[in-house]
Amino acid sequence: SQRFVWLIPALIAGAAVIVVALFGFGFLDNESEPTAAPEAVATTVPTTAATTTTTQAPTTTAAPATTTTSTTIPGLASIESVGNAIPMSSLTLKAGGIGPLVIGDAAPDAVGRLVASLGRPEEIGVADEDLGLCAGEDGRYIQWAGLTVVVAGTLRDGTFAGYRFEEQAVPTMHLDLATPSGLRVGDPLSALNEIYAAYQIDYVSDAGTDVFLLSDAEGLLLWGPVSSIEDSGRVEGIHSPNACAS
């Protein structure tokens, strides 16, 4: 009986160890069921997506086909001379033309005579209202150094419509052109006032450029840019009246 008395504490201690072990492994914990480790939840980071602006290519409506005849510029070598050369002293800058060449003459004749007198032009291009033609009017210009001749229409079928003679910073050829009364580009305003004392001379500002206007009782004769409207000013250009104003 003493042996059993000794075994009872040992059995109780062993049972306690088993109970503790079972609690340690969670088998007797009814409140907390074994849970798997929480899965990593993918955190959706709010992304500021760039606003996708669908840039639609601008629809370019094809322009109606246009004939290129009106804008064809002939080559410099294709401009033929006509008649005999005109002496430089006779190529005077007048309201109605250049020497014997009268505004309104057929373009092939007027330009051809200038080619015979001055040689091949340096440049040919499209003229517009900046050279005195009316807005939208078809035209050409032909240039020799500081002399620009304006044609209304084409060089083949148009007419001599005017000219502009201006001072060049680096002249490519020397053109000693003057008015019938002797006014030249580069002359001081005192010479202009003296030569044309019997005419009306106005000095105005046109688009920020000072110009002189030489007129008689019938209207504008000549005009052109000046360096200043003061007495120290100089004549920088001599132009015929604009074709659109006539």
Image (spheres, helix red, strand yellow):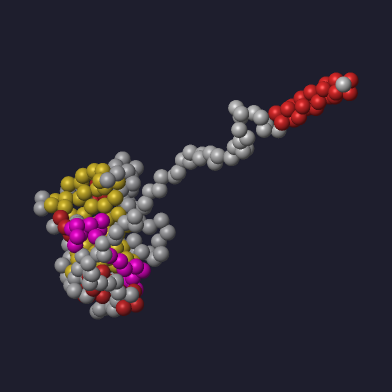
Q: Quadrant of the C terminus?
A: bottom left
Q: Nearer the viewer, residue 133 or 26?
A: 26
Q: Residue at x 34, y 74 (%)?
A: 76
The single residue placed furthest to the left in the displayed view is 218
Q: Nearer the viewer, residue 173 or 34?
A: 34
Residue 33 vs residue 9: left or right? left
The residue range painted magenta reads 117-137
Total of numbered circles in the picture? 0
Q: Residue at x 19, y 62 (%)?
A: 137
* Residue 241 at x, y percent in the picture: 19, 56
* Residue 30 at x, y percent in the picture: 61, 29
Against 211, residue 63 (above or below) is: below
Against 68, residue 184 (above or below) is: above
- In the picture, residue 125 is in which quadrant? bottom left
Q: Residue at x 17, y 65 (%)?
A: 103
Q: Quadrant of the N terminus?
A: top right
Q: Nearer the viewer, residue 233 or 121?
A: 121
